[in-house]
Image: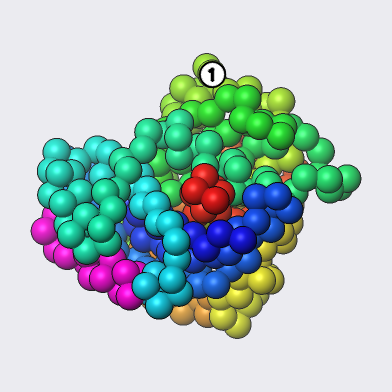
Amino acid sequence: MTRVAAIDCGTNSIRLLVADANPVTGELVDLDRRMTIVRLGQGVDRTGRLAPEALERTFEACREYAAIIKRHGAERLRFVATSASRDAENRDEFVRGVLDILGVEPEVITGDEEAEFSFIGATKELTGRDDLAKPYLVVDIGGGSTELVVGDDHVRAARSVDIGCVRMTERHLVHDGVVSDPPTPAEIEAIRADIEAALDLAERTVPLREAHTLVGLAGSVTTVAAIALDLPAYDSAAIHHSRFPYEKVREITERLLASTHAERAAIPSMHPGRVDVIAAGALVLLAIMERIGAAEVVVSEHDILDGIAWSIA
């Protein structure tokens, strides 16, 4: 066993996994897995820069994670940064801050690399299951971007497109600093248009419709799953590998798009940091299911974090 620590810093959240990994058996035993909403990508789509307050929120989470990593005695650490820090003019400021706190330089990876990690993390434990036909389409709906990956035991094709839940919300639902409550039909159509254009782009290189099993990752998908299960609180164990038909995803998406901030916040399993962005994230999932004609989505709590952990094990 090798004790490893993986950090995934995205547009909306930063997440940590400390685990014991056995590359021979394919076993990954969690010691600590946590997530903090830092909204690093706040305003990046509009300004092209990481906001000072967003950087400080992220650095504060890094300080907390550094203490956890030290306590567990992880032998290796890898810090991967995705969409927001990829897009920002001042990403050097972000890199210096992380290096000072954690002693490692964040790797600002490409969308294709992000897709590879997500695919490995989501599918490694699905090997040998007769009820899930290959090839898989792994969909990782993040804050700034969505990764679409088709593969069997290995990635065949992947594409990252800029239709994350935070980006879609800020681009279409925020006016003078206020989020539409709820979105208007015209705003929803504008998000839809962006999603469809992005899927058109993805299909130039990724055979989305060849997939037999859709695997959904990240907070937008797992939150939809928690709502579908009517959980009294967020429960990773109940959500992991749950399966939901298209009709259920459509029902929940329409409900979220028609609800107010207060109504979404009152959902027991809703993380406060997702209240304003969950409707756009659910719409991305629904549009993908419609594009490929998916009858259901398999939800995975294992994703890019697990892929990062395996990459250093």
Q: Is residue 147 magenta?
A: no
Q: Position of residue 53 (x, y in %)?
A: 14, 63
Q: Position of residue 121 (x, y in %)?
A: 59, 49
| Magenta residues (range) | 51-67
Q: Is residue 53 magenta?
A: yes
Q: Position of residue 118 (x, y in %)?
A: 54, 44
Which residue is at 44% across, 27% downward?
Answer: 197
Which residue is at 32% across, 43% downward?
Answer: 107
Left or right: residue 125 versus residue 287 is right
Left or right: residue 150 versus residue 42 is right
Residue reaching furthest bottom?
Answer: 232
Q: Quadrant of the N terminus?
A: bottom right
Left or right: residue 179 versus residue 185 is left
- Label 1 packing within 10 angstroms: few (<14), some (14-19), many (20+): few
Q: Which residue is mark 1?
A: 205
Assign a secondary structure to mark 1: loop
For this rendering, which residue is in front, 233 or 295?
233
